[in-house]
Amino acid sequence: MFSGSIPALVTPFRDGSFDEAAFRRLVDFQIDNGSTALVACGTTGEASTLSNAEHHRVIEVCIEQAAGRVPVIAGCGSNDTRNALLHMSFSRKAGAAAGLCVAPYYNRPGQAGLLAHFSYLAENSDLPIVLYNVPGRTVTDIEPDTVCELARRFPDRIVAIKDASGDLSRVTDHRMGISREFCQLSGDDELALPANAAGAVGCISVTANVAPALCCEFQQACAQNDLVRARELNDRLYPLHYAMFEDASPAPVKYALSRVHDWMTDEVRLPIVPCSEPARQAVDQALQHAGLV
């Protein structure tokens, strides 16, 4: 259903408010440089500090600006099941291709709770769901048996996973445990190469915000089994992958975008603060290594 380089878009701010004009330019920049889909209101989009009204407006603008050129995956996750369903209902009406639904954070549900949460969403909305597993942020881990059970229960609803567990064995666990086509996307840029080798088909990427053409070319090389070219591009992007997390995300990627586009600011929303000077230096060096400045 999805493949290739899929940026988890930042949400630009200016003077504390959503910078709609900059966001529209960012959407065009991504599509013009080969991104195969867009994620609005994910972790990198600072969804956790957006009001519901802002959250829905960002999704709406992304879908409107993409204008059918690429599918939009709307961030619909919440630690409140009913609020996640609210986001899914809005996103479905707005024209999203799928909802990205993170494991409920803070509540720390067990596997039975995760099954109940995602089952409720699948049973009450016809928007396809991309599971989002990032236990480093949520504490809760969507274990492979749970992913496989959800995919078996809801073959037309649970269609993909963004896995940011850091455990590459999960790709094979999911592939062998789900007896149908199931879209696996890396949630870690630095692990996209081995994840693709194991059976993933793309990456929901932070780095692609600032380097969409290179990330797209890298994913194309992987899809064509051109390992030599994929490694060359991976080496070129590798320092940037790590620089994006030299400070609390998305401060480094917003700084990077402000370095390459005069229409972007590095403004973030509390409790995130602008990235430190050492992080800025790491980003600058990585941008230079990638040939982006």
Image: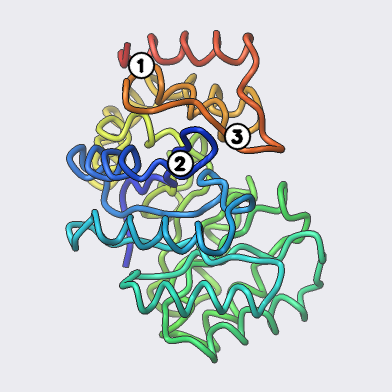
Q: Residue at x 62, y 58 (%)?
A: 133
Helix, strand or loop at label 1? It is: helix
**Residue under numbered circle 1:** 290
Separation of residues labelled 3 and 1 (CA atoms):
20 Å
User: Which quadrant does the N terminus fall into?
Assistant: bottom left
Count of all numbered marks drawn on residues in the image: 3
Helix, strand or loop at label 3? It is: loop
How many neighbours does mark 1 have within 10 angstroms: few (below 14), some (14-19), or many (20 or more)? some
How many neighbours does mark 3 have within 10 angstroms: few (below 14), some (14-19), or many (20 or more)? many
Helix, strand or loop at label 2? It is: loop
Q: Residue at x 26, y 28 (%)?
A: 229
Tell me which numbered mark, 2 or 3, is placed earlier along the sequence. 2
Separation of residues labelled 2 and 3 (CA atoms):
10 Å
Amino acid type indicated by mark 3? Ser
Rendered view: 229 above or below 189: above
Determine contact: label 2, label 3, CB under 8 Å.
no
Q: Which label is found at residue 10?
A: 2
User: Which quadrant does the C terminus fall into?
Assistant: top left
Amino acid type indicated by mark 1? Ala
How many neighbours does mark 2 have within 10 angstroms: few (below 14), some (14-19), or many (20 or more)? many
Determine contact: label 2, label 1, CB under 8 Å.
no
Q: Answer with left or right where residue 51 lies relative to residue 264.
A: right
**Residue under numbered circle 3:** 249
